[in-house]
């Protein structure tokens, strides 16, 4: 890494995520940063076209990220859908000039192809089927572009204003959709409603309410859509 590399920092100290940008660092510089960080979970990194973004998440970001994971997991478990959580695994391809660590990622449709593996090689293995990103005070544009290049089929982007579901199209671009591809019985509006319900109850009660909703509302809905009894 060149000592002449200009470092740009975007931060709301004490309020938001702290982001540092290393422009023109190159692939070797990116790998060096990954090695220096080691097994630590932070800072998270995104690499795109020679630039690396390092992000240290804030408390609001982590709270939203955790809720998103709870939501996806409760739906998967409650509906008995096989999956493999990949969490914030580093997915990267030098040929695609991109690397990303999602807030949470999941193998669902491709679960059987990954089951039992200790290492994922995107040259031969599929990317995760679903990636979710909580956005508090940083831009997710670079991460979305990396997901696109890696051909991640579905990405959820959630902030205070909305939850956006992006579905990869045959032309290789993302298009916003009202419903999930991984969960075609689920709308973006429903997910957003659960993310931003007033925090007047404990997180334990929130999870318990979510679990009941999955069993009493989603499970009958899925059965109806499949043409079976509710």
Image (cartoon, rainbow, N blue to C red):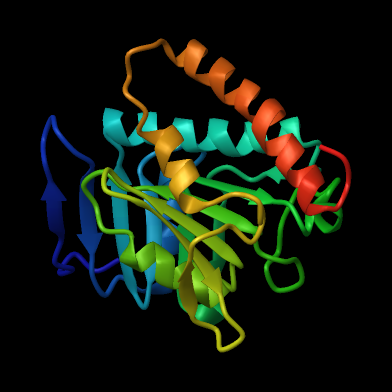
Residue 173, x across and y down, in percent: 49, 81
Residue nearest the viewer, comparing 117 with 17: 17
Which residue is nearer to you in this view: 67 or 84?
67
Examine the image and state in which quarter residue 56 appears.
top left
Residue 20's place in the image compared with 98, above or below, is: above
Q: Residue at x 61, y 27 (%)?
A: 213
Q: Position of residue 147 (x, y in %)?
A: 50, 67
Q: Is residue 95 left or right of residue 227?
A: left
Q: Is residue 28 visible?
A: no
Q: Is residue 116 left or right of residue 35?
A: right
Say which residue appears at 86% left-offset and 54% top-offset: 112
The reply to whether residue 179 is visible in this rendering is yes
Q: What is the quadrant of the N terminus in the image?
A: bottom left
Is residue 114 left or right of 176 when viewed as pictured?
Answer: right
Q: Residue at x 64, y 61 (%)?
A: 181
Q: Quadrant of the C terminus?
A: top right
Q: Quadrant of residue 167?
A: bottom right
């Amino acid at each position: 890494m060149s000592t002449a590399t200009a470092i740009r920092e975007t931060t709301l100290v004490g309020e938001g995520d702290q982001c540092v940008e290393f422009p023109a660092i190159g692939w070797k510089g990116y790998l060096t940063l990954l090695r220096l960080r080691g097994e630590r979970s932070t800072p998270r990194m995104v690499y795109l076209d020679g630039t690396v973004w390092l992000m240290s998440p804030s408390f609001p970001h982590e709270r939203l990220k955790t809720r998103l994971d709870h939501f996806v997991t409760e739906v998967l478990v409650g509906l008995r859908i096989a999956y493999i959580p990949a969490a914030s695994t580093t997915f990267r391809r030098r040929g695609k000039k991109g690397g990303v660590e999602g807030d949470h990622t999941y193998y669902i449709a491709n679960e059987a192809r990954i089951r039992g593996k200790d290492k994922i090689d995107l040259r031969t293995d599929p990317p995760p089927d679903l990636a979710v990103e909580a956005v508090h005070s940083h831009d997710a544009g670079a991460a979305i572009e990396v997901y696109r290049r890696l051909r991640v089929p579905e990405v959820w982007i959630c902030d205070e204003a909305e939850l956006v579901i992006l579905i990869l199209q045959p032309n290789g671009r993302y298009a916003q959709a009202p419903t999930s591809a991984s969960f075609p019985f689920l709308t973006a509006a429903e997910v957003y409603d659960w993310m931003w319900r007033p925090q007047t109850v404990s997180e334990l009660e929130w999870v318990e309410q979510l679990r009941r909703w999955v069993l009493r509302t989603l499970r009958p809905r899925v059965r109806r859509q499949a043409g079976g009894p509710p």
